[in-house]
Image (cartoon, grey):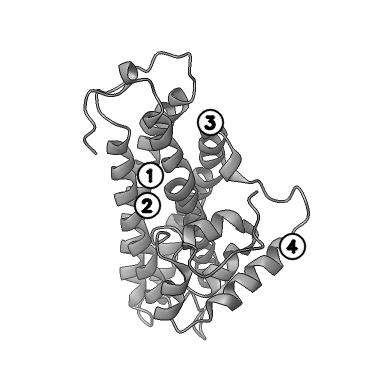
């Protein structure tokens, strides 16, 4: 991993999360968007939230230093094959599992608590939209984009596929990520930052816990794609010999 001793507040949130992955919970705690908004500098993002950027770096570095060797993988040095397979088996699986649990819980909660908490109806609607969108998104990654990226790093393999740049499906995936981020913000707003109300039963609390975990995991998921995997794919395509470049560079 790159040297982190000279970090300053001009670093982007995406780069900071990549260099100090053990410190990502600090970014979550401070509400700093390192996935969809990862191109902002730490200084700019902290200024808008009245946060000391130096304290953020210090807290993230401290968590990184207290992480045992082997606990974290440096995905910035992984191949696209390794990273895409990790995303599928870890993050995609977690999203599907979480959505199944939420799908089981929400009807029961609306029946038991809907009268006193009418926001549950709206919450169930946004979870359903998020779920439909994410399932479709993940299938398109698993069947189209990820296999394409894996072919790109196999230098001896014939580059078969659509006659346009990999930037095109990547742009679609990034747009999907923006939508997912907005949907997660709506869920957080509807649940008062995933805080259980006084009358919350065990199922209610479990639903909120699941939503909080889903939000945190999806942020890391998007970060690994937007800020590590997708740029690597664009770079790999740009490095192809001219004879093997797509006939169209349209995004």
Which numbered mark, 1 or 4, is in the foreground of this view?
A: 4
Q: Give the mark nearest the N terminus, 3 or 2.
A: 3
Q: Distance between the residues labelled 1 and 4?
A: 36 Å
Residue holding disc 4: 65
Residue holding disc 2: 131
Q: In front here: 53 or 197?
A: 53
Q: In front here: 93 or 158?
A: 158
Q: Quadrant of residue 119?
A: bottom left
Determine whether the residue tagged by mark 4 lies in a helix, strand or loop: helix
Determine whether the residue tagged by mark 2 lies in a helix, strand or loop: helix
Q: How far apart are marks 1 and 3 (CA)?
A: 21 Å
- Report if the CB atoms under discs 2 and 1 are less than 8 Å apart: yes
Asked if residue 213 is positioned above or below residue 73 in the image, the reply reads: below
Q: Disc number at residue 81?
A: 3
Q: Give the mark nearest the N terminus, 3 or 4.
A: 4
Determine if residue 192 is in view.
no
Residue holding disc 1: 135
Determine whether the residue tagged by mark 3 lies in a helix, strand or loop: helix
Q: Give the mark nearest the N terminus, 2 or 4.
A: 4
Position of the C terminus by quadrant: top left
Asked if residue 23 is positioned above or below residue 168 in the image, the reply reads: below
| Image coordinates for residue 49, horizontal then vertical, percent | 43, 81
Q: In front here: 129 or 115?
A: 129
């Amino acid at each position: 991993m790159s040297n982190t001793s000279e970090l300053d507040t001009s670093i982007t949130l995406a780069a900071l999360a990549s260099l100090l992955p053990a410190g990502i919970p600090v970014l979550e705690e401070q509400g700093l968007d390192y996935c969809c908004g990862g191109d902002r500098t730490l200084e700019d993002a902290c200024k808008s939230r009245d946060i000391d950027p130096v304290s953020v770096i210090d807290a993230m570095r401290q968590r990184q230093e207290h992480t045992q060797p082997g606990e974290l993988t440096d995905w910035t040095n992984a191949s696209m094959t390794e990273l895409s397979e990790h995303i599928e088996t870890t993050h995609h699986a977690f999203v599907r599992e979480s959505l199944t649990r939420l799908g089981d819980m929400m009807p029961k909660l609306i029946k038991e608590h809907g009268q006193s908490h009418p926001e549950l109806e709206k919450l169930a609607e946004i979870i359903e939209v998020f779920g439909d969108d994410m399932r479709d998104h993940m299938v398109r990654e698993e069947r189209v984009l990820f296999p394409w990226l894996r072919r790109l790093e196999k230098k001896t393999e014939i580059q078969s596929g659509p006659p346009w740049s990999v930037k095109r499906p990547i742009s679609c995936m990034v747009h999907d990520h923006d939508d997912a981020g907005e949907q997660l913000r709506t869920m957080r707003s509807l649940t008062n930052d995933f805080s259980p109300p006084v009358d919350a039963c065990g199922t209610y609390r479990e639903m909120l816990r699941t939503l909080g975990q889903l939000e945190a995991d999806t942020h890391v998921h998007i970060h690994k794609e937007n800020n590590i995997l997708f740029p690597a794919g664009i770079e790999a395509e740009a490095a192809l010999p001219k004879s093997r470049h797509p006939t169209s560079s349209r995004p």
